[in-house]
Image: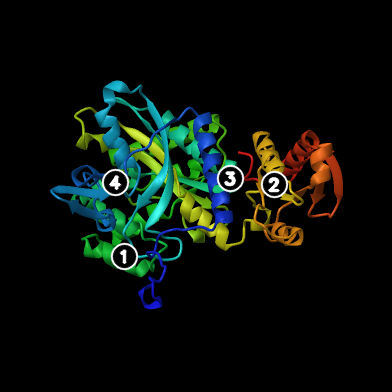
């Protein structure tokens, strides 16, 4: 192919791609989260990336509709999933008679959002979700279980977070009190922008929707309420006597009681937490890295009472949580949180010389079968070149195999960090390398 015919390699903006060492770390994080989900009795599920548009867009609205990748193939109108919750609702409605309720499932997979790429925001991203779906009813205990699970996920990743919790019924109740129910979604979308644009602009947009100065003031007062549960609820009760408003406060108090019983500690009650999706109806929560709220949420979740109503006449309330693992990993990577020099897919390299390739290949298989990640540099290069390659790839140990080693069945083991060399049978080498790996493992290894 002539040079003028070569295609310049490039990828679409907003789509994620990691280098191998970064991918090792990322995969370890996913494994950690999966272990937490399984330990808490959540079952695995994997739904299709493509869904019928009528199903995926059944209850979205607002900014979500603008972000969906939608297209047709023949006569089929379809969308790429923008989250994992709506496909879950479709799945539960389809298989209701085959499932045990409350149905607890987790799913780790990619979702797609056609928004403008920018720092921390991607068009392709992983979500790590866990949800509990009830049949007819679902206790607020399920809400507390999801919030508690949320905290456990971040502990498993060795990250300190603040989990900020609210209840959408409180804001919805006040909006109902001022008779703005028909514009509730629009009001919540504007309020969700607090902290992202000047307050003057927030008030202006609320007034454009028909709210008075005093109503704007009260809504902003509600949004700015945060702290301990007693202080928050006592402050709110003075603002409004609407039944839905008071129901939201009561649910928040009940949730707090359950979370205390479950030993969940990293909770701040914060009415600014709204969540953008239109299907949340009660408890909502988001996670922020401790002391780093300016970075934005790194996960969230909430209660949805009516999500399945678009697929089934049966009432199937649910509550779920999602770790924004792509955005979280990107933040940590950019801030140098990970030591990539300690990340390697190889425990040791086998370097052979003389005519020992066949014996060395057998040795590598023996090591791998015994839990040692061994690689062999089998190219026809000099011993010196192979040692340079081991250094370049930051291999901790090298096993040297020559004719003498093959005869004695004792192999030279070199520690590439210290330069120390010693001779051992293969069993001792396996024990030594595995022990060294366990001692020096990062928090993201040995899941």
* Contact between labelled residues 2 and 4, with CB atoms less than 8 Å apart: no
Alpha-carbon span between mark 2 and mark 1 = 75 Å
Q: Quadrant of the N terminus?
A: bottom left
Farthest-out residue, bottom? 4
Disc 1 designates what residue?
A: 203
Classed neighbour count for the residue bearing mark 3: other residues with Cα under 10 Å, few (<14), some (14–19), many (≥20) = some
Classed neighbour count for the residue bearing mark 4: other residues with Cα under 10 Å, few (<14), some (14–19), many (≥20) = many
Alpha-carbon span between mark 4 and mark 2 = 72 Å
Is residue 250 found left or right of 356 in the rendered image?
A: left
Q: Nearer the viewer, mark 2 or mark 3?
A: 2
Label 1: which secondary element:
helix
Mark 2 / mark 1, whichever is N-terminal = 1
Alpha-carbon span between mark 3 and mark 1 = 39 Å
Observer-nearest residue: 358 or 282? 358
Label 2: which secondary element:
helix
Alpha-carbon span between mark 4 and mark 3 = 35 Å
Q: Quadrant of the C terminus?
A: top right
Alpha-carbon span between mark 2 and mark 3 = 42 Å
């Amino acid at each position: 192919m002539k040079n003028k015919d070569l295609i310049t390699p490039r990828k679409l903006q907003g789509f994620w791609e990691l280098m191998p060492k970064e991918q090792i770390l990322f995969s370890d994080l996913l494994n950690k989260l999966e272990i937490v989900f399984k330990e808490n009795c959540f079952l695995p599920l994997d739904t299709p990336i493509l869904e019928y548009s009528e199903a995926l867009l059944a209850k979205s609205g607002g900014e979500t509709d603008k972000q969906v990748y939608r297209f047709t193939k023949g006569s089929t109108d379809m969308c790429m999933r923008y989250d994992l919750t709506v496909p879950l609702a479709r799945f539960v409605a389809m298989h209701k008679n085959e499932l045990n309720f409350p149905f607890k499932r987790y799913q780790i997979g990619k979702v797609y959002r056609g928004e403008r790429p920018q720092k921390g925001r991607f068009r392709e991203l992983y979500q790590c979700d866990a949800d509990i779906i009830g049949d007819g009813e679902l206790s607020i205990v399920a809400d507390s279980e999801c919030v508690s699970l949320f905290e456990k996920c971040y502990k498993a990743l060795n990250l300190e977070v603040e989990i900020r919790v609210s209840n959408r019924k409180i804001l919805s109740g006040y909006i109902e009190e001022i008779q703005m129910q028909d514009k509730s979604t629009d009001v919540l979308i504007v309020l969700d922008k607090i902290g992202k644009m000047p307050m003057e602009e927030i008030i202006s947009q609320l007034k454009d929707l028909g709210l008075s100065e005093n109503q704007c003031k009260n809504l902003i007062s509600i949004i700015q309420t945060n702290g301990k549960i007693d202080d928050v609820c006592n402050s709110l009760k003075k603002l409004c006597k609407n039944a839905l408003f008071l129901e939201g406060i009561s649910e928040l108090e009940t949730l707090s009681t359950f979370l205390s019983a479950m030993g969940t500690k990293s909770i701040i009650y914060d009415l600014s937490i709204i969540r953008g999706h239109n299907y949340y109806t009660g408890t909502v929560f988001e996670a922020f890295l401790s002391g780093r709220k300016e970075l934005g949420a790194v996960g969230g979740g909430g209660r949805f009472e009516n999500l399945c109503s678009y697929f089934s006449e049966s009432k199937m309330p649910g509550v779920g949580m999602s770790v924004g693992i792509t955005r979280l990993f990107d933040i940590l990577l950019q801030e140098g949180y990970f030591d990539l020099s300690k990340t390697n897919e190889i425990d040791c390299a086998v370097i052979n010389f003389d005519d020992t390739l066949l014996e060395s290949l057998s040795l590598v298989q023996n090591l791998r079968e015994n839990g040692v990640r061994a690689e062999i540099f089998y190219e026809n290069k000099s011993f010196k070149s192979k040692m340079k390659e081991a250094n370049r790839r930051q291999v901790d140990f090298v096993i040297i195999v020559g004719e003498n080693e093959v005869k004695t069945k004792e192999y030279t083991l070199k520690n590439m960090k210290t330069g120390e060399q010693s001779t051992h049978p293969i069993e001792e080498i396996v024990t030594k390398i595995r022990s060294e790996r366990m001692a020096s493992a990062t928090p993201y290894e040995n899941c």
